[in-house]
Each structure stands twice: as structure tokens, then as C-alpha cells.
Image: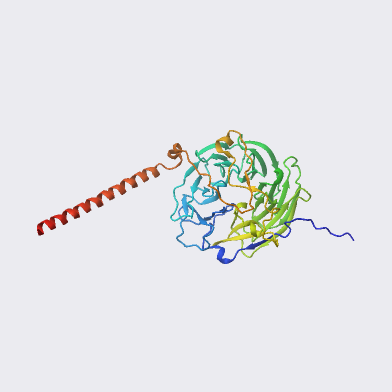
């Protein structure tokens, strides 16, 4: 009898574990909006979550260390006039976050170190160019201050955030709603999935289609797509019988998928998170109570099921920590921030190892926070490879790349009233000071008169 050989992989025993209750973020009213975005974004400093807000849209930003019960009076970022649909931290500056909203605008916010002490209502920059609600945001992985936004007007816009300019507008490619849009590892291509059942690889600067794939999944429900190792494409979608599927495609030969696997019959859209360092893809379904994870390799069947983290409560959204925010001495290879109805719960993915020394095979050099090209260089045609850092001694933040807005921009991208308001406040404070001095002089004069009459 032939002996069954188990595929060798150092990630076979990866397991997920929720943190203890006192390390969660409690009493947060997570947004009830029915929109298939992550609703959560996280970096080594902050966790941001879209929350319910009356009379507009808001999201909450908390320092990672501010765990436990969150006070009802916790200030939020509340400058949008419609519900917030997507938020995304800038990969090159941990204090800068972008938000897209039903009010058709994209806003860029600067969060002070230590978090908010009062509500933040004035963005650094407001980007206006969409005519319908903005539901997808994605920062360029290597170019500084380049942001992709996609909206329900079926338009993709690439912004130079520092100037507030819509430099590239891709408005004639997608005939229907855009389900997902993401960059490849160096930002030289964009991958989109659309309601017309087509995958497209785009040249971001020209706005032209490099490759088009019809019906990656037969079903009519939303498809998600991400670039994985060696330029391959991983998609999640549905069959005609509404079974959830995951597939892997080779762009050089995309007639047939390299693999197509059926998972289950749930209705939630599967959000894929790919880790290029370990080649593991994590699938988190909205409304599910589990996270499945697979290893992507060069050998058939290419997408190998590893395991599944399960819990009792379903997830309303999911944040994914960048590699530089993980605890390497605990062999942590991923950390998710799972949104419940009233709390945010970190979930840690760990490779069991006996040694607590640095495991070089688990932590190859990873993408750091330093951009390799400036926005103007990238838009003029220069690509930049990601600048890698070692995690051997843990990630130590150097001076953050400063977020600069051109002075000429302020009059066009931020409300001029902000400056008038600042000037009037300064005038008011001076007038108040003059009034107090006059009162003091009057009091002294009366005192002198009193003393003189006594003499």
C-alpha cells in the first residue's frame, strides 16, 4: 500500500487566536452600512474604524495601546456630510489617513501622535472629482502621495494628493460598478473587477487596458481580485449555484484558471488579504465567523488549504496589520482586527516554534514605510521597486516622511473659510487682551484716586 505523503510546509500548523477580552476595543458602534469594504484600517500606531454617526459620516481613530472600554465621548473624524464607506492608512506616513464617502468626496486627514483629543472636522486636503459615492481607496505602494479612488460613477481617479490634482481619470473602461481595484507590488499596474463580469489589468498612467478576462466566476455576485506572487491573480467569487469559489490565474495564459476551488454556500463576499512574504492568502467573509487561509505555491494545485480560524460571532469588517507592526519574537505572521457590532477584536496568526529567537525563514525582508519615488516622478513615467527593511531587531520607526501640501493648493483644496476663521480668532483674542488691559488700568486708576483722597 502506497504511503500518503503530506506536503511539506512551514505554515502547515499556523493557528489563529483571539486576544484576551481586556486587549479588545469595546463599546464602539460599528457602522451599519451595507457596503463590501473592510470598514477598518490599521497600522503600527493606530486602528481606525468606520462608526455610526448621525448627520453625516464619521470614523474613529484609536492608538493601538488604548484598549478596553472606549468612552461614548471619544472624539471622531467627522468632516464628511454622508456616511463613510472606506478608509485607508497611508503606507508612507502612519499619521495620514484617506476616507471616501457617500458625499462623493475623498478627504485626507492628519492624525496627531497620541490620537484625537477633540473631534477632527477639517481635512488637510479634500479631493473632489467623483459624481457618485466613493467606495474604494488604495494608496500607491511605492510612490509618495499617489492615491487611487473608485466610485459608483464607474470612474477610477489617480490623485497627486499633495497638489490635490486628479492627474489620471479612467472613465471609459468600466461600463458598470467597480467591485475592487488594487495595485501590483511596484504600482506599475492596476487590477480591477467589475459588475460586467470582467477582470481588467490597466496601465495606470495611460488608463488603457493591458488584459481583459471575461467571467472569472460564473455567478452574478461580486468578484474580488488581488495580485499575488509572480504577477499571478487570485480571485474570489461565486458559481452559478451561488457557491463561493477561489481561483488562481496566470495573466500570460488566462484561458483556464490554474486552479478553481469551491468553498461553501455562504452569501458573504470573501475579502482576500495576501502576504507576499509568506505567500499566504487569508479569506475573510463579511458576515462569516471564520478566516480561511491558503498557501500559494508554484506546484499544483497552486492554492493549498492550510487551516481555518473559527469563532462564534460574525465579522462586520476586518483590518490587516502591515508586517512591520507584528511581534516577531512571538512568531506572529499576521494580525487581523475583527469588527463585531460593538467592539474590535485583534486576532493573532502564529507559527508554533519552540525558540523565541528571530526566525529568518518566517521573516524575509519586508516592505518598509519609505517611498521609492515621488508622485511627480511616478506620473512622469518612473517606476520604483519597494524599499525593503529587516525585522530582525523589530521595526524601529525613523523620522516619518512628512506630509507636505503645496501652499498654492490651500486656497483650492481646503475651504478658504478655515484661514478666515483662523484670522478672525486671532483678532478676537487680541481684542479680548486689550479689553482686559483696559479694565486693569481702570482698576488701578480708581485705586490711585482712593489713596489720594485718604491722604
Foreground pick, 240 / 226? 226
**Colour treatment of the image:** rainbow
Percent across and percent down for residue 46 are 53, 54
Judged left or right of residue 420, residue 394 is right
Which residue shows up at 70% across the image and 41% down it?
213
Vertical comparison of 146 with 364: above or below: above
Percent across and percent down for residue 86 are 55, 50
Which residue shows up at 57% across the image and 35% down it?
377
Percent across and percent down for residue 248 are 73, 48
Percent across and percent down for residue 311 are 64, 64
Residue 310 position by quadrant: bottom right
Q: Quadrant of the N terminus?
A: bottom right
Q: What residue occupies the far right of the structure in this picture? A: 1
Residue 197 position by quadrant: top right
**Visible in this render: residue 395?**
yes
Vertical comparison of 370 with 60: above or below: above
Foreground pick, 185 / 440? 440
Foreground pick, 115 / 87? 115
Judged left or right of residue 384, residue 72 is left
* Numbered disc total: 0
Foreground pick, 198 / 158? 158
Q: Quadrant of the C terminus?
A: bottom left
Judged left or right of residue 18, residue 442 is left
Judged left or right of residue 311, residue 250 is right
**Visible in this render: residue 322?**
no
Amino acid at each position: 500500500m502506497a504511503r500518503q505523503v503530506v506536503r511539506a510546509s512551514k505554515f502547515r500548523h499556523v493557528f489563529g487566536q483571539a486576544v484576551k477580552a481586556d486587549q479588545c476595543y469595546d463599546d464602539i458602534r460599528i457602522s451599519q452600512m451595507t457596503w463590501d469594504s473592510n470598514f477598518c484600517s490599521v497600522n503600527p500606531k493606530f486602528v481606525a474604524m468606520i462608526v455610526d454617526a448621525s448627520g453625516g459620516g464619521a470614523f474613529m481613530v484609536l492608538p493601538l495601546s488604548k484598549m478596553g472600554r472606549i468612552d461614548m465621548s471619544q472624539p471622531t473624524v467627522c468632516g464628511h456630510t454622508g456616511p463613510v464607506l472606506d478608509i485607508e492608512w497611508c503606507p508612507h506616513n502612519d499619521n495620514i489617513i484617506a476616507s471616501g464617502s457617500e458625499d462623493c468626496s475623498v478627504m485626507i486627514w492628519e492624525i496627531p501622535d497620541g490620537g484625537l483629543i477633540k473631534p477632527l472636522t477639517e481635512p488637510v486636503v479634500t479631493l473632489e472629482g467623483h459624481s457618485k459615492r466613493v467606495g474604494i481607496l488604495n494608496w500607491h505602494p511605492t510612490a509618495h502621495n499617489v492615491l487611487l479612488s473608485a466610485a459608483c460613477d464607474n470612474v477610477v481617479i489617480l490623485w497627486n494628493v499633495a497638489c490635490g490634482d486628479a492627474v489620471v481619470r479612467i472613465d471609459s473602461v468600466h461600463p458598470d460598478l467597480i467591485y475592487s481595484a488594487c495595485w501590483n507590488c511596484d504600482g506599475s499596474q492596476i487590477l480591477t473587477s467589475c459588475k460586467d463580469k470582467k477582470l481588467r489589468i490597466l496601465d495606470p498612467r495611460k488608463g488603457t487596458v493591458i488584459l481583459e478576462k471575461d467571467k472569472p466566476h460564473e455567478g452574478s455576485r461580486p468578484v474580488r481580485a488581488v495580485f499575488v506572487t509572480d504577477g499571478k491573480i487570485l480571485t474570489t467569487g461565486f458559481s452559478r449555484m451561488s457557491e463561493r469559489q477561489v481561483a488562481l490565474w496566470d495573466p500570460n495564459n488566462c484561458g483556464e484558471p490554474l486552479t478553481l476551488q469551491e468553498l461553501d454556500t455562504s452569501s458573504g463576499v470573501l475579502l482576500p488579504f495576501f502576504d507576499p512574504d509568506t505567500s499566504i492568502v487569508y479569506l475573510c467573509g463579511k458576515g462569516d465567523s471564520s478566516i480561511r487561509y491558503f498557501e500559494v505555491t508554484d506546484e499544483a494545485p497552486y492554492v493549498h488549504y492550510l487551516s481555518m480560524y473559527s469563532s462564534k460571532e460574525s465579522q462586520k469588517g476586518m483590518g490587516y496589520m502591515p508586517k512591520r507592526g507584528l511581534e516577531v519574537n512571538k512568531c506572529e505572521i499576521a494580525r487581523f482586527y475583527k469588527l463585531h457590532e460593538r467592539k474590535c477584536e485583534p486576532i493573532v496568526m502564529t507559527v508554533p516554534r519552540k525558540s523565541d529567537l528571530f526566525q529568518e525563514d518566517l521573516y524575509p525582508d519586508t516592505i518598509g514605510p519609505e517611498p521609492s519615488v515621488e508622485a511627480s516622478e511616478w506620473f512622469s513615467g518612473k517606476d520604483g521597486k519597494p524599499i525593503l527593511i529587516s525585522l530582525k531587531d523589530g521595526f524601529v520607526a525613523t523620522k516619518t516622511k512628512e506630509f507636505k501640501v503645496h501652499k498654492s493648493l490651500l486656497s483650492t483644496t481646503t475651504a478658504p473659510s478655515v484661514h478666515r476663521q483662523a484670522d478672525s480668532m486671532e483678532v478676537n483674542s487680541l481684542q479680548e487682551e486689550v479689553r482686559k488691559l483696559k479694565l486693569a488700568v481702570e482698576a488701578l486708576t480708581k485705586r490711585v484716586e482712593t489713596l489720594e483722597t485718604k491722604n
